[in-house]
Amino acid sequence: MAADIGDFEDPTAEVLAEAAAAFGLLASAARLHIMWALAQGECDVTHLADRVGGALPAVSQHLAKLKLAGLVRSRREGRRQIYFVDDPDVVTVVRSMVGQLAARADAPSARVRELRGTGG
């Protein structure tokens, strides 16, 4: 049963502004790709840049913004900084949104294969 809209208290203006800022950061395809990669597991900036196909300085700048917003954290491991998403709710949001859109994008081709009887 769906919850009645009256069952939830409206968030404060400050909370809404903070959420909008976080979503604003994720409105960049490059930063969203970085978040997707980090949602799969921790990584240093060199491997992360290779994984997302970005230049090292650009990925570093994106990570600095994400870190400042509290979306990612880092720890030192020897001479390397290891980045990770520490908040399971952020991981859930990123995986859910990107995963749902990826599945939706794959659905038409899967449906065509099904209709053709080729299965996959």
Image (tube, helix red, strand yellow):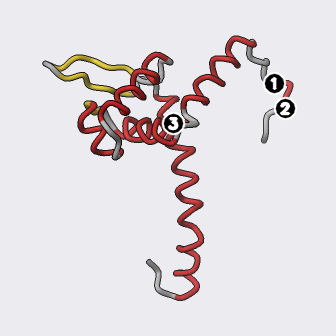
- Residue at figure coordinates x 74%, y 12% from the top left: 12
Residue under label 2, please give it.
4
Q: Describe the element under mark 3 as helix, strand or loop.
A: helix
Image quadrant occupied by the N terminus: top right
Residue type of the residue flagged with mark 2:
Asp
> Under tag 1, what secondary structure?
helix
Crowd rating for badge 2 (residues with CA inside 10 Å; few <14, some 14–19, many 20+): few
The amino acid type found where label 3 is placed reads Thr
> In which quadrant of the rendered view does residue 5 lie?
top right
- x%, y% of residue 60? 34, 27
In x, y percent, where is residue 29?
A: 51, 42
Q: Which residue is drawn at 19% across and 23% down?
A: 80
Whether pointer 2 and pointer 1 mark residues with C-beta atoms closer than 8 Å, the reply is yes
Q: Which of marks 1 and 3 is in front?
A: 3
Q: Is residue 106 left or right of residue 51?
A: right
For marks 1 and 3, give the CA distance.
23 Å
The residue beneath circle 1 is 7
- Quarter of the view holding residue 17: top right
**How many angstroms separate mark 2 from mark 1 (CA)?**
5 Å
Q: Point out the tag, 3 or 2, that comes first from the N-terminus.
A: 2
Mark 1 nearby-residue class (10 Å; few <14, some 14–19, many ≥20): few
Q: Name the residue under label 3.
A: 92
